[in-house]
Image (cartoon, rainbow, N blue to C red):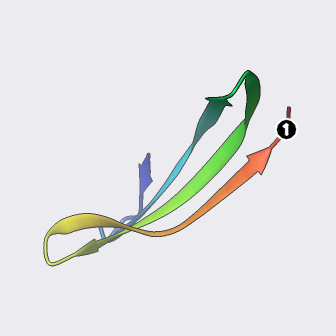
Amino acid sequence: MEIDQAGERAAELGRWTARWTGAEMSGRYLACWKKQTGQWVIESELFVTLS
């Protein structure tokens, strides 16, 4: 996770994998976080299927 200088927003980049009924998919994700009343909450998410 990378946090901005003000400490109010952050970006998270990673990998995801999902499995169900014998199938598997995976890819990358990006999540945008913001600090609201002292706690981090997700502002937006993007999941990209790559396999």
The residue located at (69%, 27%) in the rendering is 21
29 or 51, which is in the foreground?
51
Q: Secondary structure at mark 1?
A: loop
- Residue reaching furthest to the bottom: 37
Side of 26 where 45 appears, left or right: left
The residue located at (65%, 30%) in the rendering is 20
- Residue reaching furthest to the front: 21
- Residue reaching furthest to the top: 22
Image quadrant where residue 39 sits: bottom left
3 or 28, which is in the foreground?
28
Residue 21, above or below 12: above
Amino acid type shown at disc 1: Leu
29 or 24, which is in the foreground?
24
- Residue reaching furthest to the right: 51
Location of the N terminus (image quadrant): top left
Image quadrant where residue 46 sits: bottom right
Residue beneath label 1, please? 50
Side of 43 where 46 appears, left or right: right
Location of the C terminus (image quadrant): top right
Side of 1 where 47 appears, left or right: right
